[in-house]
Image (cartoon, helix red, strand yellow):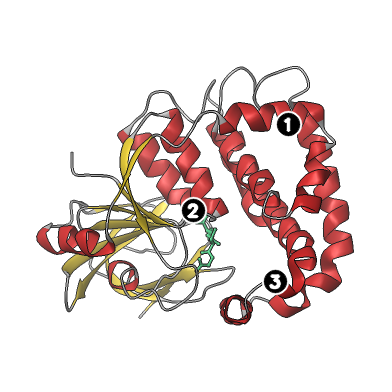
Amino acid sequence: MPEIILHQYPNSPFSEKVRKILALKKVTWRSVDQPVIMPKPKLVPLTGGYRRIPVLQIGADVWCDSGIIARKIEELYPEPTIYPGGSEGVCHAIALFADRRFFFSTTPVIFEKLGASVPKEFIEDRSKMMAGAGANFTELTQTAPDARNQVRAFLDLLDRQVANQPYLLGPSFSLADAACFHCVWFLRAEPSSFALALRHANLIRWFERIEKMGNGNVTPMEPDEALRIAKESTPAAEESYDAIDPNGIKPGMKVAVMPEDYGFDPVAGTVVVSTLYEIAVERTDPELGKIVNHFPKIGFRIQRV
Ligand SMILES: N[C@@H](CCC(=O)N[C@@H](CS)C(=O)NCC(=O)O)C(=O)O
């Protein structure tokens, strides 16, 4: 099988979620470090405009968003499953809570305390990325007190959930653990924020158990090498579609796909896959040739163009 390449950066919480899934499955993978802020000239040719991290690349196929990345890794490496005991539904529901609710309560708490030490370029970049999302990155500190109330309650709920079992859903690690773990892991960026977690003994035992899983068998790769692999590969995605899709999206149609929450950079292409959970489009990049970009349907907008 061609190499599994994860485009990421070490401090990225959503990458940490994926790294823990790779660790569970003991996957051998390659890591390409991408910039934390725009521009990302060695990522965007692969994604067609999508700028968020993480991004998974296998040859000339590129998966954008940790939701579809988790599904792809599960498909490639079904054992051990991220859905132990048939928990796929509850895992994805908890992952949505963690990624959309819990994570976005941690950011005001952390950035309020980091304050002036956060580089101006970072604030400007994230403010642009959030523009149009009804959230103002520069006003994060004003929302910190309410966000902190939520973080404390979420941490307490997690602590209770692991009081009598090693993982959130029972004896085995699941996607729910990976998704909630990355939020607690992010709190470590700032000591007084992580102190909120340290008050919970069960939670910290769970956190340390997951930390010990490591990151799988990873070796670095230069961004140029990943671009070369994409250029020399042919997309493997095969046409597939949902025949009862009320929106009637089918292979061959031209669409633009973009996140519904922030980072509104549309990726335009020709539909290859449109199933219940996935939309994939083929594009021709001037340097790389044909690339297929895969996105989850949950959390993304699809527009006919
Ligand atoms: N829903 C996305 C969220 C990804 C996300 O927000 N990632 C952060 C980094 S952890 C990001 O892309 N920040 C802006 C950037 O790195 O350019 C996912 O699950 O992958």
Tell me where residue 18 appears, x and y as whole percent. 47, 44
Q: Nearer the viewer, residue 289 or 31?
A: 31
Q: Nearer the viewer, mark 1 or mark 3?
A: 3
The kind of residue on which mark 3 rests is Ser
Quick one: SS at disc 2? loop
* Tag shown at residue 204: 1
Residue sticking out furthest to the left: 232
Measured as percent of width and height from the top left, residue 53 is found at: 46, 60
Badge 2 amino acid: Pro
- Residue for badge 3: 117
Q: Does mark 1 have its CB less than 8 Å from ligand 1?
A: no
Residue 126: image tag: none
| In this view, the mark in front (2 or 3) | 3
Circle 2 packing at 10 Å, graded few (<14), some (14-19), many (20+), is few
- The answer to whether mark 1 and mark 3 are in CB contact below 8 A is no
Q: Is residue 251 visible?
A: no
Q: Residue at x 19, y 60 (%)?
A: 230
Ligand 1 under 8 Å from disc 2 Cβ: no
| Residue behind mark 2 | 10
- Location of the C terminus (image quadrant): bottom left
Query: Residue 252: x percent and y percent?
Result: 23, 67
Residue 261 in view in this figure: yes
Name the residue type under label 1: Ile
**Could you tell me how far apart the alpha carbons at marks 2 and 3 are, in whole angstroms?**
19 Å
| Between 23 and 255, the one nearer to me in the picture | 23
Q: Earlier in the sequence, mark 1 or mark 2?
A: 2
Look at 81% across and 45% down and name the residue there.
Answer: 195
Question: Quarter-wise, where is residue 251 in the image?
Answer: bottom left
Q: Earlier in the sequence, mark 2 or mark 3?
A: 2
* Residues at circles 1 and 2 in contact by the CB criterion of under 8 Å: no
Above or below: residue 275 compared with residue 254:
above
